């Protein structure tokens, strides 16, 4: 797709991109790109839907935020990819904000952010907070956990909301936890009620061994170069500083 002009495409930051008219178009572009910010702000890197909910699209499309239409609402797509596909992860991966990474590209981010280190390696090095450890331990014990249960199991009260939220993002940014769908709250009578709750699981439980094996086969230097090259294909104006933070999840050189 890169460097070629096709009917039904729009000129993006770098290469000609297919106009996104619906969910199917979105997944097609995402698989080609490999990753994307989840919202309308590209953060100086790249977002497939690069307009916010209160802005007009740059081209004629029925795609609109927060309509509830599963075919044309990008807000619905974040869970739809998790429910219907096994080749895409969605979580707060970039700049402490939501984003998508496909199965093809996940090993490169894994190699840069975790390498061969497991959770205890990072914790003992002081790179993981005590609050994050409480959350991770709860997930290890229970497996998939909805947000409301996870908060309670990890011992966080209402007054701890900001600490809990920071720690949960920390685990997502370091690729230890990822979103794996939604779960209903269950009443004392065993019946579902209320709004769906976001569910989390360990990265190792979300992906098959093939992804983790691919991550162990590439060096962080090689992985960084591959991601950097792809970012610049999508957005030649991306700055070195932003690219580094996008890749590693932290400020650097």
Image (tube, helix red, strand yellow):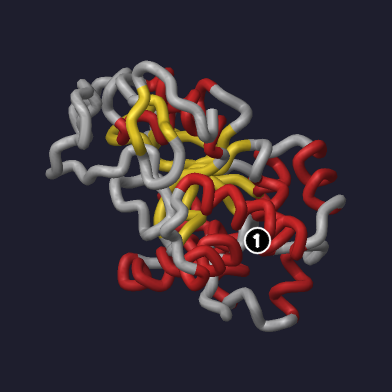
Q: Write down the quadrant of residue 210 in the picture.
A: top right
Q: How many marks?
A: 1
- Nearer to me, 96 or 163: 96
Residue with the mark numbered 1: 137
Instruction: Please report the residue visible at 31 percent of the width from the left and 35 percent of the height from the top.
Output: 75
Q: Is residue 155 visible?
A: no
Q: Write down the quadrant of residue 115 in the picture.
A: bottom right
Judge from the rendering whether residue 158 lies leftward or rightward of residue 105; answer left or right: left
Q: Position of residue 28 (x, y in %)?
A: 49, 24
Q: Decide: is 14 above or below 238.
A: above
Instruction: Please report the residue visible at 53 percent of the width from the left and 46 percent of the height from the top.
Output: 233
Q: Position of residue 181 (x, y in %)?
A: 49, 35
Judge from the rendering whether residue 160 lies leftward or rightward of residue 86; answer left or right: left
Judge from the rendering whether residue 137 lies leftward or rightward of residue 84; answer left or right: right
- Nearer to me, 198 or 65: 65
Q: Is residue 29 visible?
A: yes
Q: Position of residue 171 (x, y in %)?
A: 57, 62
Instruction: Please report the residue visible at 52 percent of the width from the left and 62 percent of the height from the top.
Output: 246
Quadrant where the image shows the N terminus: top right
Q: Secondary structure at mark 1?
A: helix
- Nearer to me, 48 or 145: 48
Judge from the rendering whether residue 140 lies leftward or rightward of residue 187; answer left or right: right
Instruction: Please report the residue visible at 36 percent of the width from the left and 59 percent of the height from the top.
Output: 43
Q: Decide: is 166 above or below 12.
A: below
Q: Position of residue 41 (x, y in %)?
A: 30, 52
Neighbours of disc 1 within 10 Å: few (<14), some (14-19), many (20+): few
Quadrant where the image shows the C terminus: bottom right
């Amino acid at each position: 797709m890169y460097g070629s002009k096709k009917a039904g495409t729009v000129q993006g930051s770098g290469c000609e991109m297919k106009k996104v008219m619906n969910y199917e178009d979105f997944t097609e572009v995402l698989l080609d790109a490999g990753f994307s910010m989840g919202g309308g702000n590209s953060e100086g890197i790249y977002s497939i839907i690069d307009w916010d909910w209160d802005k007009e699209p740059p081209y004629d499309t029925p795609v609109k935020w927060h309509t509830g239409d599963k075919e044309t609402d990008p807000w619905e797509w974040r869970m739809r990819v998790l429910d219907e596909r096994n080749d895409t992860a969605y979580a707060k991966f970039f700049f402490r904000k939501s984003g998508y990474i496909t199965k093809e590209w996940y090993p490169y981010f894994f190699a840069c952010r975790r390498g061969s280190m497991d959770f205890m390696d990072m914790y003992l090095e002081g790179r993981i907070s005590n609050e994050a450890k409480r959350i991770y331990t709860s997930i290890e014990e229970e497996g998939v956990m909805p947000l409301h249960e996870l908060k309670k199991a990890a011992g966080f009260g209402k007054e701890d909301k900001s600490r809990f939220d920071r720690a949960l993002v920390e685990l997502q940014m370091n690729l230890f936890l990822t979103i794996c769908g939604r779960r209903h709250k269950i009443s004392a009578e065993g019946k579902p009620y209320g709004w769906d709750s976001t569910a989390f699981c360990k990265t190792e439980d979300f992906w098959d061994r093939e992804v983790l094996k691919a991550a162990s086969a590439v060096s962080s230097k090689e992985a960084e170069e591959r991601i950097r090259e792809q970012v610049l294909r999508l957005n030649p104006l991306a700055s070195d500083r932003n690219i580094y933070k996008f890749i590693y999840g932290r400020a650097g050189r």
